Image (cartoon, rainbow, N blue to C red):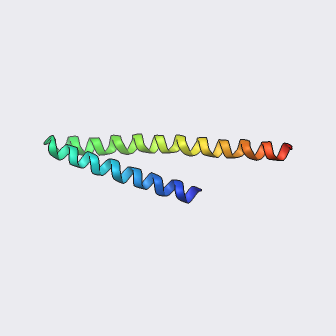
Amino acid sequence: MQRTLSFITGLAILIVFLIWGNLATKLDLSTVLTIIGYIVLLVITTIIMTIITVYIQNKKAVDEDKSRDK
């Protein structure tokens, strides 16, 4: 499960970066703005994937507790 989530995280970051790079080129943004955009996108994507990971781990722990109580 953890490997799959890591793969999905990496794939999501790659796709978001490719879209941002394409958009920054089309909007003719400066290098500084493009780099700042990359940093912001990396932080946002990392936070979202961390939230998803914590949710999955908590759900798994709750399910294990329920099965243990039976």
Task: Indicate the quadrant where residue 3 lies.
Answer: bottom right
Q: Residue furthest bottom?
A: 3
Q: Who's the residue at 28% across and 47% down the image?
A: 19
Where does the image place residue 2, in percent across and percent down from the top left? Answer: 57, 56
Q: Who's the residue at 52% across and 44% down the image?
A: 50
Q: Who's the residue at 34% across and 40% down the image?
A: 40
Q: Quadrant of the C terminus?
A: top right
> Would residue 64 be found to the left or right of residue 22 on screen?
right
Where does the image place residue 5, in percent across and percent down from the top left? Answer: 52, 53
Q: Who's the residue at 41% across and 55% down the image?
A: 11
Where does the image place residue 65, in percent across and percent down from the top left? Answer: 78, 43
Q: Residue furthest left?
A: 28
> Would residue 20 be found to the left or right of residue 28 on screen?
right
Front position in the image: 70 or 38: 70
> Would residue 38 be found to the left or right of residue 57 on screen?
left
Task: Indicate the quadrant where residue 63 lies.
Answer: top right
Q: Residue furthest right?
A: 70
Where does the image place residue 43, in percent across and percent down from the top left? Answer: 40, 42
